[in-house]
Amino acid sequence: MLKLNGLFANKKQIAGLDIGSSAVKIAEIAEGPDGYMLQNFASVPLAKGIITDGIIANPNALVERIKELLKISHCKARTVVTSLSGYSVIAKKIGFPSMDEESLRELISDEIEKYLPFGDMKDVNFDFQILGPSEMSPGQMEVFLVAAKKDVVQSYVETLKKAGLDVAIMDVDSFALETMYEENYDYGHEDVCILVNIGASMTNINVVKGGASIFIRDFPLGGTSITENLQDKTGVSFEEAERVKLEKASSGDENSRDELLTYADPLLLEIERSVDYFRSTYPGKFIKQILLCGGTARMPGIGDALLQRLNVEVEIANPFRKVSADKKSFSAEDLKEIGPQASVGVGLAMRRIGDK
């Protein structure tokens, strides 16, 4: 499991804060002798345009929504783990000659422009994890390198500070999903699982083998693209198209489901292309299953459509498989309802200072 610790860290109790383009969610998870327990989860919607391509476009509006979230959730934690996604962060697996961590950090600091499209190292926060020896190239090791512009990271830190929160760790959405998966699912050393998080405007794909990332890709399509395709086809407003989409999704009618899937075709095709690219890059790796996360994961028929396209078992991820909850606060139906949208937040809330 890849856990980045170097962008930001301090030693306080933390909650997971998942800031998406359409909602902001908070999760608090305690760890005790009997395992993890969900203490708190809440979500508030964000207006379109507050977050754009992973960048905070309207900090004041985000501050107000986070304050409202803290109020309705009764969250006591004021230190959080949050994450970046999409264009705001770059994550790549790169081969390096075998060396120790200190030497690798010095090499990357001196030559980061060779590996990532950043002009000046002084403008970048980066971290990495050595995955181990390369299977293909003797004398080489595989490294996951993650970087984000300092001004992007700082904009999140400053905005959350205005909302009364301190950032303990700045993570990445795809790696938060990996944390959620490792803590909830059983797997063997060779088991390959594809985590697909379909957000409103961004889809994160993280292929994990034996619980560790081997392939990551983000692309700018999500649930909103389905609404926009419906809008283009029918000529109605975005708000009306969103209402129609939700109505069709909840109708239980097979024709409505099939119609929705036509609007989702570009999204499904991009997921298919990503999986095909992984298969071509890692020939012979058997994909055990695909786990869907994000609000769009519950759209009727989307799992079956991916099964038909990819011939891989598809199911909705359950971030509460091994996480208990107070039955007075969360019913089994509550956990099932919030599960897909809670996956990133749960992974963030499971982070602990110093783990890697």
Image (tube, rainbow, N blue to C red):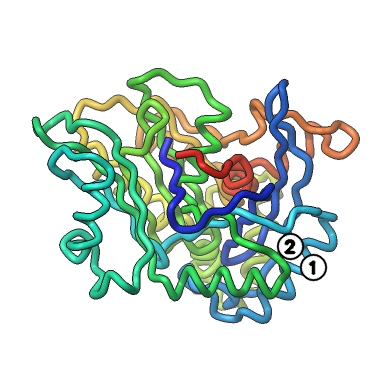
Q: Position of residue 326 (x, y in %)?
A: 84, 33
Q: Which residue is mark 2?
A: 44
- Which of the two discs, 1 and 2, labels the residue nearer the N terminus? 2
Q: How many numbered badges does the structure rendering display?
A: 2
Whether tag 1 and tag 2 are in contact, CB under 8 A, the answer is yes
Can residue 117 be seen in this snapshot?
Answer: yes
Identify which residue, 129 or 244, lies in the foreground: 129
Q: Residues within 10 Å of mark 1 (few under 14, many from 20)?
A: some
What kind of residue is marked 2? Val
- Residue visible at 47% across and 55% down? 264
Mark 2 residue element: strand
Checking the image for residue 344, the label placed there is none
* Snapshot quadrant of residue 346: top right
Q: Amino acid at mark 1?
A: Glu
Q: Give residue 46's quadrant in the image.
A: bottom right
* Up-down relation of residue 196 to residue 263 (above or below): above
Res 300 visible: no
Q: Which residue is mark 1?
A: 68
